[in-house]
Image (spheres, rainbow, N blue to C red):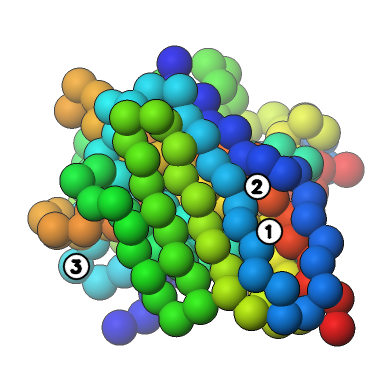
Amino acid sequence: KQEVTQIPAALSVPEGENLVLNCSFTDSAIYNLQWFRQDPGKGLTSLLLIQSSQREQTSGRLNASLDKSSGRSTLYIAASQPGDSATYLCAVRLLQGGSEKLVFGKGTKLTVNP
Amino acid sequence: NAGVMQNPRHLVRRRGQEARLRCSPMKGHSHVYWYRQLPEEGLKFMVYLQKENIIDESGMPKERFSAEFPKEGPSILRIQQVVRGDSAAYFCASSPLATISYEQYFGPGTRLTVT
């Protein structure tokens, strides 16, 4: 059974700091991995999607890496801003027996202090 | 192109009532997924549907919960005889029939409160 773990559960940093969020998964048979952002009481915003054959993806100040063999992904946020404060979710996409689904971690709650 | 739409955004039901949650996928998308987020928990897969077919309902509770995605109209997640433990945010996602990225696009969610 696939399990996704995110460390740390919460993180508080001063504005301007570079930071790394970690995600690990137990089964390397994934189709892709996606990082989302969730603001309180809101839906999910997709940040980056990495296909299983890729090593990293970049979008602006965000960089996500994937090491499928070791079951790890990281989300790097450069020059953090107060507006980056949110919960960041990692999810792996599974294809099994004609079905597909996302398995989510519990998230890392990020607070960027001005 | 409008995103995934869900309504209502907030729903309050008394114990024992029925809750109906609606999801309209993005235009051109024929795959719909429902996820539930309990307080302080991660999102959990519930069900995967294509038009007129339930593909995978392995995440659905065995009783009181049902889902459909008819040929016309939105996908419906139905919860009968709601209990307090059903209080959660319910998210719908959709994806197109064929795409290189196979990304799921999420709606804003319906927050169900059972009193």
Label 2 Cα crowd, 10 Å radius (few <14 / some 14-19 / many 20+):
many
Q: Are marks 2 and 1 in contact (CB under 8 Å)?
A: yes
**Could you say which disc has been placed on residue B28 in the image?**
3
Pinpoint residue B109: horizontal percent, then vertical percent.
58, 59
For the residues carrying marks 3 and 1, which lies nearer the camera in this image? 1
x 45%, y 81%: residue: A60
- Tell me the chain of label 3: B
Q: Secondary structure at mark 2?
A: loop
Residue position for label 1? A87
Residue position for label 2? A107
x 31%, y 69%: residue: B26
Q: Are marks 3 and 1 in contact (CB under 8 Å)?
A: no
Distance in Å between CA atoms under marks 2 and 1: 6 Å
Label 1 Cα crowd, 10 Å radius (few <14 / some 14-19 / many 20+):
many
Q: Is disc 2 on the same chain as disc 3?
A: no
x 33%, y 36%: residue: A68
Q: Secondary structure at mark 1?
A: strand
- Tell me the chain of label 1: A
